[in-house]
Amino acid sequence: MDDLFIKKIWIDQDRIPRGSYLRGIEALRGVEELKLTSAVTFFVGENGTGKSTLLEAVAVAYGFNPEGGTRNYSFSTYDSHSELCQAMRIGKGYRRVRWGYFLRAESFYNVATKEEEYAQDPFCPVPSEELHMRSHGESFLAVVQKHFRPDGLYILDEPEAALSPQRQLTLLMEIHRLAQQGAQFLIASHSPILLGIPDGEIWSFDDGEIHRVEYEETESYQVTELFINNRAYLLKRLLGGDGA
């Protein structure tokens, strides 16, 4: 698509310090360029393969706060983001981002706290969403309804973490609707529900390299399908009930 906000991601490997732990992440080692072609791009892979690290670096390089929120959020409770953003360059499209949000499941509590503080400012035009008064899943969907609009850029790190399967379907519908209205999403996810969104582009970080895969090739889909179709047999094998 020619109207994406982020069209390419370049990494200058020479700008990553020699002693950085980033050089030990196999999938990121040697990557120079990723070209995005869909309004919805997923990063998938086993824990520790680098998908959240890359997603965070893209968000910071684009101007988002490392812990999340809109691009107007500016705070830090724990400086943990990597130096990958300093070695990264973003290839932007011709359109200007009107809205945006970076969501990290692990730091959403801190973002909710900061949202309440910002709302106390007399110059703040809107009241607080009081996210701490809701469940984690309810507060996240409240953020989607408030901050996610057409023509926006949304970077989501494991958004399914707080959502039931039914709420994941709700999020899927919201992502699909907004993508059709000019929004772009970059999402790191393990959810076989979210990954099934039509026309989504999926990049796998498994097998030591970043590569395109189809939905049915993702481990999230394969493991879920295997468990649902062979639950009794798998539980016997996994839990030692086969007499072994």
Image (spheres, rainbow, N blue to C red):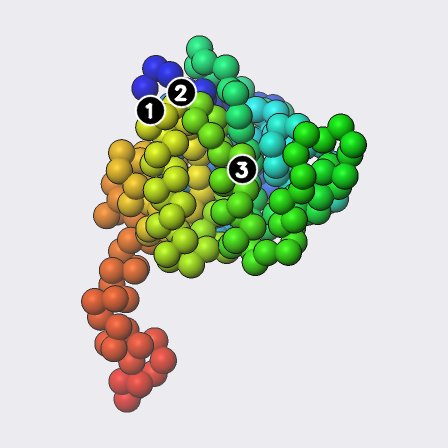
What residue is shown at x 38% (from left), y 48% (from top)?
170
Question: How would you rate the neighbour count of disc 2 (Cα within 10 Å): few for under 14, some for 14-19, many for 20 or more?
Answer: many
Secondary element at tag 2:
loop
Residue 121 sits above or below residue 13 on the image: below
Residue 236 sits above or below residue 34 on the image: below
Residue at the limit of the structure toward the bottom, as seen here: 243
Question: How would you rate the neighbour count of disc 1 (Cα within 10 Å): few for under 14, some for 14-19, many for 20 or more?
Answer: some
Are the two marked residues, 1 and 3, in contact with CB atoms closer than 8 angstroms?
no
Q: Position of residue 194 (x, y in %)?
A: 35, 46
Seen from the viewer's position, the closer of residues 30 and 144 is 144
Q: Position of residue 146 (x, y in %)?
A: 53, 37
Please name which of the two marks, 1 or 2, marks the residue nearer to the observer.
2
Mark linked to residue 4: 2
Q: From the viewer's perspective, tell me whether residue 202 is left or right of residue 81.
A: left
Quarter of the image where the C terminus is located: bottom left
Q: From the viewer's perspective, tell me whether residue 184 is left or right of residue 19.
A: left
Q: From the viewer's perspective, tell me whether residue 235 is left or right of residue 121.
A: left
Are the two marked residues, 1 and 2, in contact with CB atoms closer than 8 angstroms?
yes
What residue is shown at x 27% (from left), y 56% (from top)?
222
Q: Label 1, label 3: how many angstroms apart (C-alpha)?
A: 27 Å
What residue is shown at x 36% (from left), y 44% (from top)?
172
Location of mark 1 (residue): 37
Please name the amino acid that badge 1 sits on: Thr
Residue 232 sits above or below residue 68 on the image: below
Location of mark 3 (residue): 146
Please name the amino acid that badge 2 sits on: Leu
